[in-house]
Image (cartoon, coloured by chain):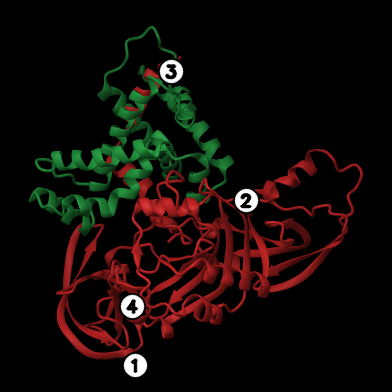
Chain colours: A green, B red
């Protein structure tokens, strides 16, 4: 963890009034990107970023994350997903629909099987990702954790969009097979 | 309507992937996309050969056409994850890379990893402690240093540091240093002496959706025009620091904009930009924040017109060597065109194509050629990715 993160956590731990602004200075763009990539709505993204700060304020202390980047990203993502779930009840969202449609390709056909526990599913996905090459895993995480679109991933990682799409296709198929082979139901 | 329950569950579970997987993916954002990174492109000249296709004309705002310059990127040597994401170990860093932070009473300064000539050093300001963090062992190191004033540069912006183990001086700067006015900005950084220009100016048209189209690069010495048109009569022009909201608003509304490649000598701020847009704003990503100044529409228009009238322009298209489908083919315009390969920095005319449209060329090949002009998305708008540090963004 870099020294800035250590200081930000110290500020939260000491309940400093500067804590949120320090967090915002470093993580606002990242949080905003994650929220916007999921929700595709600036107002909703703004609301989720603010909720993320509040959640970090409420949770540190007692929490003392070892990796503040991952901690903050995870909170922003979860809040945004909750908002998305709420939004999906009443309206559609083209970009997110595409993302969810892709993810449906990872889900084994086990409708008649009881779904696996969250921990079982989480461990299976972690093990699967652990077995991927760094490049394939980073592309998968960028697409399905950070919810970046293919074009953006292509630009950032210096591979063609076709390559990104191919890698994602292959990874989804392999994940589906991995879950199926291990008897994991979503 | 499908409820997406399973997909949402999968999305939720993916939230819990290990921290290192998240940071590994996120950390790659710390580098600019390599094909946009002109510093990388410059140093990777051996990997690059360019083909200039003359006679291929595209209209830009109805002002006539510009030739397309195709730049082939042989990316193998520069796009590997090791090269892009590798963090050097403590012993592999030079001393100014090891001790990256300096705290003085004026605030915290960051190492610019840049040596400064001793002739630019004035008197000693203070003795202080510099600190550095080793990402591998997660240890923080400290060392005693001497701090010096840099000639004609405000201490609020940058100072020089001398380590006990070295007789060299290194620049440490305050990334969030914020002078009150444009004039103060110029004086405090001594830009009259220290501002240099890359010789490249890119003109982009930013639409209301934050995307650009018709991007034209001009080459020429723009320094006189910058000082005489843009930076003259600048008393009391206030500075505004861009936060994320300002950034978005600005990106969406800037219209025709000239992006001027600049560097601040001695400071380690290289390959950054100064932008001038038709709405009268001058923006820059100098230091660690975007900042803008309203200089007026008249000045901005005069400058944009000057560049368009006086410099040669061309449209750049980057082509991946590992994607043969992207390779440009001569377009059939009914005119002849010269194809020039640039190898090792030298232009060599190697092929002359006849570009008369053959009657049989109306199938997929011809359709594929139509896709050769690319429209690049804006870099400043959120949603493009998780990286917001593109070189052309204030």
Instruction: Using the image, determine if residue A163 lies above or below residue B62.
Output: above
| Label 4 chain ID | B
The outermost residue toward the right is B359
Q: State the residue position of label 4.
A: B184
Regarding mark 4 in the picture, which secondary structure is present there?
helix
Measure the C-alpha gap from mark 2 to mark 1.
Answer: 47 Å
Single out the mark in the foreground, 2 or 1: 1
Residue A181: image tag: none
Q: Position of residue A41 (x, y in %)?
A: 40, 36
**Residue B189: x and y, percent?**
35, 79
The one nearer the camera, A80 or B324, is A80
Residue B119, disc: 1
Find disc 2 in the rendering and name its residue.
B322
On the image, the x and y values in percent for residue B130 come to 19, 73
Location of residue B89 with respect to B19 vertically, above or below? below
User: Looking at the image, can residue A167 be seen?
Assistant: yes
Residue A183: quarter of image: top left
Q: In the structure shown, which secondary structural element does the residue marked by tag 1 occupy? A: helix
Q: Are the residues flagged by discs 2 and 1 in contact, CB closer than 8 Å?
A: no
Circle on res. A108: 3
Task: Mark 3: give few (<14), some (14-19) or many (20+) Cα within 10 Å.
Answer: some
Residue at the image point whose x is 15% and y is 50% from the top: A9
Q: Tag 1, which chain?
A: B
Where, by quadrant of the figure, is residue B105 drawn?
Answer: bottom left
Relative to the observer, which residue lies in front, A176 or B370?
B370
Q: Cα distance, mark 4 to mark 3? A: 63 Å
Q: Quadrant of the N terminus of chain B?
A: top left
């Amino acid at each position: 963890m870099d020294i800035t993160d250590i200081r930000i956590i110290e500020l939260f731990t000491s309940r400093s009034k500067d804590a949120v602004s320090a967090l915002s200075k470093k993580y606002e763009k990242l949080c905003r990107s994650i929220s916007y990539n999921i929700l595709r709505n600036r107002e909703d993204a703004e609301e989720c970023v603010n909720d993320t700060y509040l959640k970090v304020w409420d949770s540190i202390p007692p929490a003392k994350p070892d990796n503040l980047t991952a901690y903050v990203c995870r909170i922003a993502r979860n809040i945004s997903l909750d908002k998305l779930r709420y939004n999906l009840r009443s309206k559609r969202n083209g970009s997110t629909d595409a993302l969810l449609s892709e993810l449906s390709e990872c889900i084994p056909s086990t409708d008649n099987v009881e779904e696996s526990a969250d921990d079982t599913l989480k461990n299976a996905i972690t093990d699967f990702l652990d077995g991927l090459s760094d490049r394939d895993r980073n592309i998968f995480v960028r697409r399905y954790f950070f919810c970046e679109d293919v074009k953006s991933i292509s630009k950032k990682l210096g591979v063609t969009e076709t390559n990104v799409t191919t890698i994602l296709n292959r990874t989804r198929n392999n994940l589906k097979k991995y879950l199926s082979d291990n008897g994991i139901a979503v | 309507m499908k409820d997406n329950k399973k997909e949402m569950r999968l999305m939720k579970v993916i939230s819990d992937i290990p921290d290192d997987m998240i940071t590994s993916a996120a950390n790659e954002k710390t580098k600019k996309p390599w094909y946009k990174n002109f510093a990388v492109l410059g140093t990777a000249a051996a990997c690059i050969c360019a083909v200039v296709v003359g006679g291929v004309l595209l209209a830009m705002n109805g002002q006539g056409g510009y030739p397309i310059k195709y730049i082939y990127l042989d990316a193998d040597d520069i796009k590997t994850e090791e090269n892009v994401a590798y963090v050097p170990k403590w012993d592999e860093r030079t001393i100014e890379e090891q001790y990256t932070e300096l705290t003085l009473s004026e605030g915290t300064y960051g190492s610019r990893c840049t040596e400064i000539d001793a002739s630019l050093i004035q008197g000693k300001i203070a003795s202080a402690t510099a600190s550095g963090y080793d990402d591998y062992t997660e240890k923080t190191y400290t060392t005693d240093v001497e701090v010096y004033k840099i000639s004609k540069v405000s201490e609020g912006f940058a100072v020089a540091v001398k380590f006990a183990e070295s007789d060299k001086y290194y620049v440490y700067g305050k990334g969030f240093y914020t002078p009150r006015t444009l004039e103060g900005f110029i004086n405090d950084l001594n830009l009259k002496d220290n501002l240099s220009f890359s010789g490249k100016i890119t003109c982009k048209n930013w639409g209301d959706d934050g995307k650009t189209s018709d991007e034209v690069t001009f080459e020429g010495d723009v320094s006189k025009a910058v000082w005489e048109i843009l930076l003259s009569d600048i008393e009391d022009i206030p500075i505004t620091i861009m936060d994320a909201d300002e950034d978005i608003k600005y990106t969406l509304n800037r219209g025709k904009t000239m992006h001027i490649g600049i560097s601040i000598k001695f400071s380690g701020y290289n390959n950054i930009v100064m932008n001038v847009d038709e709405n009268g704003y001058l923006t820059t990503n100098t230091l660690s924040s975007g900042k803008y100044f309203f200089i007026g529409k008249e000045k901005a228009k005069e400058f944009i017109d000057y560049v368009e009238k006086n410099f040669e322009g061309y449209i750049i298209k980057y082509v991946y060597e590992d994607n043969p489908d992207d390779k440009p083919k001569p377009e059939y315009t009914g005119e002849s065109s010269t194809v020039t390969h640039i190898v090792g920095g030298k232009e060599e005319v190697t092929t002359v194509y006849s570009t008369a449209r053959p009657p049989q060329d109306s199938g997929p090949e011809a359709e594929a050629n139509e896709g050769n002009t690319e429209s690049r998305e804006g870099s400043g708008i959120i949603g493009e990715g998780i990286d917001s540090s593109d070189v052309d963004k204030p």
